Amino acid sequence: MASLLLQIRDRFDRLGMILSGLCLVHCVAGLVIVAGLGLGGTFLLDPMIHRVGLLLAVLVAGAAIGLGALRHRRRSPLVVAIAGLLFMTGALVVDHGFEEAVLTVIGVSLVAIGHLLNLRAA
């Protein structure tokens, strides 16, 4: 049973890192496409995408890193991931644009690092 939980947690950590990478690409590409070409602003900058992304990040990080913290008793993955989620939340309350992109990039990077630390702690 413990082996199965470890496999599930590992998969969630990997999923979290993939989602963080996709979010990073979406954020940077969205800024370039919208600012540089003036295309896709309605879809790419839709606040609902960011809200759903944050919800997914909280669920995946909570499952993977929360289970990991209970198992290996290391706080650093949890602290780093929570800091990242706070940056991502901050990105929801600022206007679309450079500030939002910076907060999001910092946030998803920290969440991805939290997942990586969690994998290494196992």
Image (cartoon, grey):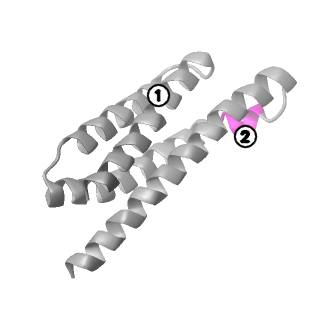
Task: Verify CB contact (< 8 Å) between mark 2 and mark 1.
Answer: no
* Quarter that holds the N terminus: bottom left
- Could you tell me what secondary structure mostly forms the magenta stretch? helix
Q: Is residue 70 magenta?
A: no
**Quick one: 78 or 101, which is closer to the camera?**
78
Which SS class for mark 1? helix
Q: Badge 1 local density, few (<14 within 10 Å), some, or many (20+)? A: some
| Left or right position of 90 against 19 | left
Residue at 46% across, 24% down: 93
Residue at 32% across, 46% down: 117
Examine the image and state in which quarter residue 114 appears.
top left
* Direction bottom: furthest residue: 1
Q: Which residue, given by chain and number where applicable, does mark 2 sit on?
A: 43
Identify the magenta region: 41-46
Examine the image and state in which quarter residue 39 appears.
top right
* 2 or 1: mark nearer the eye: 1
Image height of 4 relative to 55, above or below? below
